[in-house]
Amino acid sequence: MGTVIPLSDASRRPRSWQVATALIIAINVLVFFRELVGGNAFVEQWAAVPAMIVSGHGWITILTAMFMHAGWMHILGNMVFLWAFGPAVEDAMGHVRHVIFYLIGGVVAMAVQIAASPTSTVPTLGASGAIAAVMGAFLVMYPRDEIRSVLIILFFVRIARIPAVLLIGVWFLIQLFNAGQVANVQTGGVAYMAHVGGFIFGAATARIWRRKEA
């Protein structure tokens, strides 16, 4: 049994400090602490429930839900992935474009998840759909880069440089294989369709968002 934790792009350094990525992470952390204080009532108010959105209620939650998380491991995992791939994408797009791209990617991801399970009453929340869009853009922009990662296989742990096309490609195949799982349960789970939708959006539009000089 093994896992890979991406840390950073080992093939390049951003040309400037990545303000937008840091800001997005900060907002996610602040909202998470607000969740801890507000409890279930806060989650129920601001998480996206597909059935409610389809019925015309709670549209704002499509946006707010992408800054919420279900627990410590959820937010830590998402923020690690965002910090690994976000800086290089932001460097290519610019600060403002990156924020807009991230938000639209998250909305598209959530819309795909809702379309896949329109009758679900399970609250959907998390930044992973937007981060999937960032990963899709990264793969298109820098397929030959290597990602500095923590490789864990049972009790064996080491730092390795893994080609982006392999790391992200395998990740996407896993999401694709599991797509539709949440639509078949009412007790929660991973929103795989959101991951797939966000990733495809990011990969398909990456070159449109990229600055000419990047």
Image (cartoon, rainbow, N blue to C red):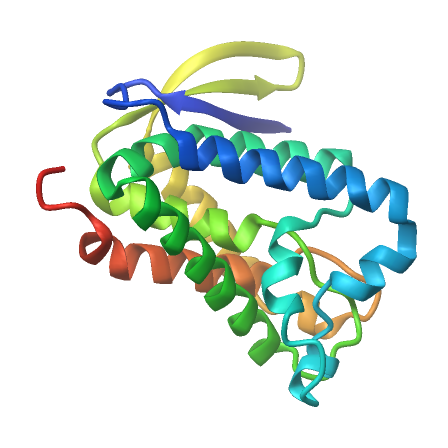
Instruction: Please count the marks in the image.
Output: 0
Using the rendered image of the protein, determine whether residue 85 is visible from the camera's viewpoint.
Answer: no
Residue 43, image x, y percentages: 82, 57
Decide if residue 34 is in sight here. yes
Residue 211's place in the image compared with 26, above or below, is below
Where on the picture, by quarter, is residue 156? top right
**Which residue appears at 25% of the width and 43% of the height?**
93
- The residue at 36%/31% (across/down) is 87
Identify which residue, 87 or 201, lies in the foreground. 87
Which of 136 and 58 lies nearest the eye of the viewer?
58
Residue 33 falls in which quadrant of the image? Answer: top right
* Residue at the limit of the structure toward the bottom, as seen here: 55
Q: In this view, does 207 lie above or below 6?
A: below
- Residue at image position (23%, 22%) is 15
Query: Most extreme residue toward the left, as rendered?
Result: 213
Q: Quadrant of the N terminus?
A: top right
Q: Position of 118 compared to 161: left or right?
A: right
Say left or right for 118 vs 165. right
Nearer to us in this view, 83 or 116: 83
Task: Tell me where residue 100 appears, x and y as whole percent.
Answer: 38, 55
| Residue 138 place in picture, x, y as percent | 31, 41
Q: In which quarter of the image is the C terminus?
A: top left
Q: Specify the quadrant of the image occupied by residue 170.
A: top left
